[in-house]
Amino acid sequence: MFFLKSDELRNHVQSIIHQDTQQHETHFDLTVDTIHKFTKAGSLDFGGSEFEAADTELINPQKNQGDEYGWWNLSQGHYRATMNETVKEIEDTIAFISLHPHAHKAGIIANTSMLHNQQNGNPITLNFFVPGPGCNIKENARFAMLYLLAS
């Protein structure tokens, strides 16, 4: 198995904000488009007949005077980020995303997530936690990294 590299990796990514900044040798940076806060518990059961997704609420970024892009000023809590980018034609690969090092250093906590084939063309999301001091995230910030593993 090997990581898809550069241009081959780029062929599987859509809705790119700035390719020169986002494209790397073995991964592609994903940028944050929207952030939702969890507002109501979901439900899980063995058979799935009582499954309920957790409710979320969209958080609007706040723009400072003169800024083209706004900021999410997040307090401690659990959130879901939706990326600008989508993936396509990933049937023959293992796709996963992990937190961008800058987001990690800013205090955000998230697990690595695998993407399923049904993800093709659908929004990529990543659940994350913001610790006590909070975190400020600017619209279109590089938030996660996409890797594609092929055999």
Image (spheres, rainbow, N blue to C red):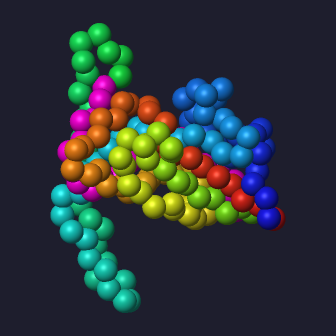
**Which image quarter: residue 134?**
top left
Q: Position of residue 52 (x, y in %)?
A: 28, 73
Q: Is residue 118 left or right of residue 136?
A: right
Magenta part of the chain? 70-91
Q: Quadrant of the C terminus?
A: bottom right
Q: Residue at x 21, y 68 (%)?
A: 41
Q: Is residue 93 left or right of residue 14?
A: right
Q: Is any part of residue 84 visible from this angle?
A: no
Query: Is residue 26 in the magenta section?
Result: no
Q: Is any part of residue 81 visible from this angle?
A: yes
Q: Residue at x 60, y 33 (%)?
A: 22
Q: Quadrant of the N terminus?
A: bottom right
Q: Residue at x 42, y 43 (%)?
A: 105
Query: Is residue 72 in the magenta section?
Result: yes
Q: Position of residue 66 (x, y in %)?
A: 29, 10
Q: Position of residue 84 (x, y in %)?
A: 48, 39
Q: In the figure, 124 relative to 61: above or below?
A: below
Q: In the figure, 84 relative to 119: above or below?
A: above
